[in-house]
Image (cartoon, rainbow, N blue to C red):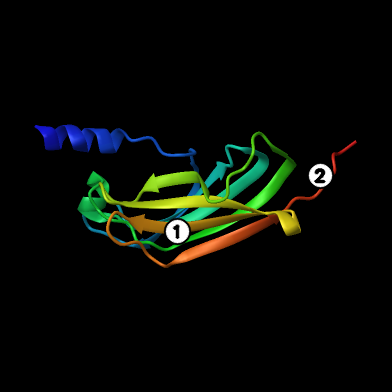
Amino acid sequence: MRLAKALVFLLAWPVAGMAREVGEVDTVFKWFGPNHKIVVEAFDDPKVEGVTCYLSRARTGGIKGGLGLAEDRAEASIACRQVGPIRMSDELEDGEVVFKERTSLVFKTMQVVRFFDEARNTLVYLVYSDRVIEGSPQNAVTAIPILPWASNP
């Protein structure tokens, strides 16, 4: 009974940020269950107005993937862009999680963290995957110089 309650809690655990799926492509056909895919998702930085990040990552298909029991691969790619005037709502904390999503039933997550390079006036975003026991060194990084935003007359 305790294990069931713990699983319900972990499955209901909120993630930082919410992504919207932009598109997907199939990579491997599966006879049963959904195909393996690469999905592209977009999310806005919750503390930095004017920044949108695009994340591409593998999603495991098949029967286990369709049931949410499969573990997705650790590889991901990220590109963040200035999409309007940049306004920071709060003091930014280096290494703060701006997006997090489970990539296995319980133990593995993919997350995006933000750093501010004050010397270059640049926001830096890092995507990586971690596990309770052992994470992965695979990662991707993107940077956005904070520039004035030209508004249309």
Image quadrant containing the C terminus: top right
Q: Rate crowding at label 1 as few (under 14), some (14 to 19) or many (20 or more) other CA atoms within 10 Å.
A: many
- Is residue 3 visible to the viewer in this orientation of the structure? yes
Label ID, residue 149: 2
Helix, strand or loop at mark 1: strand
Q: Are marks 1 and 2 in contact (CB under 8 Å)?
A: no
Q: Residue furthest right?
A: 153
Q: Amino acid at mark 2?
A: Trp
C-alpha gap between disc 1 and disc 2: 30 Å
Q: Amino acid at mark 1?
A: Tyr
Q: Is residue 24 left or right of residue 124?
A: left
Q: Quadrant of residue 125?
A: bottom right
- Residue 12 percent across, percent down from the top left: 30, 33
Residue at point 51% right, 53% down?
55
Residue at point 64% right, 39% down?
91
Residue at point 74% right, 41% down?
84
- Is residue 37 visible to the viewer in this orientation of the structure? no
Label ID, residue 128: 1
- Residue 124 percent across, percent down from the top left: 62, 56
Looking at the picture, tell me which residue is in the foreground, 5 or 52: 5
Looking at the picture, tell me which residue is in the foreground, 15 or 21: 15
Q: In the image, which is nearer the foreground, mark 1 or mark 2?
A: 1
Residue at point 45% right, 51% down?
111
